[in-house]
Amino acid sequence: MVIGHLGADPDMRYTANGNAVTTFSVATSRKYTADGVQKEETEWFRIVTWNRLAETCSEYLEKGRLVYVEGRMQTRSWEGQDGAKHYMTELIAQEVKFLGGRTGAAREDVEPDDLPFAYDQRFAGLSDEDVRWA
């Protein structure tokens, strides 16, 4: 689980098979005091979303937006042109919740049903009748 702010607008593309994939970075920060000096550390996470979740994130997320992301960590490796082995760890999102308001939208122009504040891939393709809402 990661809660943080987007560092840039999401980047969406499509695979050769037509699957949507959106990537974005999320920063989490913590403040602490060491030796009487207040310090702040920021960690960056690369988030990867697929299919309908990718399309939703691309449409509604923007730089600075606060999000909650839940998923699994995955590390990829490859050999660069220089022959060195490179590694990248990514969070493959299963759920993304949009926290806070949209910074660029006039709230009175947006219907609540148009904003997917939470989207969970486990329920992809199910209608409202298929899911019992609490």
Image (cartoon, rainbow, N blue to C red):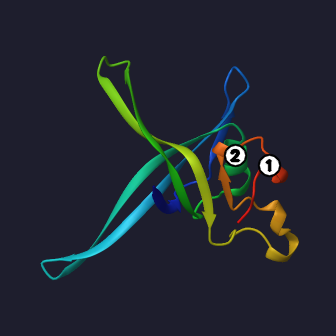
User: Which amino acid, mark 1?
Assistant: Asp
Residue shown at the point (62%, 53%) measured from the top left: 9
- Rendered image: mark on residue 102: none
Give x and y (percent) for residue 84.
29, 21
Instruction: Tell me the CA gap for discs 1 and 2.
Output: 9 Å
Asked if residue 39 lies left or right of residue 93, the reply is left
Quadrant occupied by the N terminus: bottom left
Q: What residue sits right under mark 2 in the picture? A: 123
Dot 2: within a 10 Å radius of its alpha carbon, few (fewer than 14), some, or many (20 or more) residues? few
Asked if residue 90 lies left or right of residue 32, the reply is right
Nearer-the-camera pick, 26 or 126: 126
Q: Is 100 situated above or below 98?
A: below
**Residue extending farthest bottom:** 36
| SS of the residue under disc 2 | helix
Residue 22: image quadrant is top right
Residue shown at the point (52%, 62%) measured from the top left: 5
Asked if residue 130 lies left or right of residue 6, the reply is right
Q: Are marks 1 and 2 in contact (CB under 8 Å)?
A: yes
Q: What residue sits right under mark 1 in the picture? A: 130
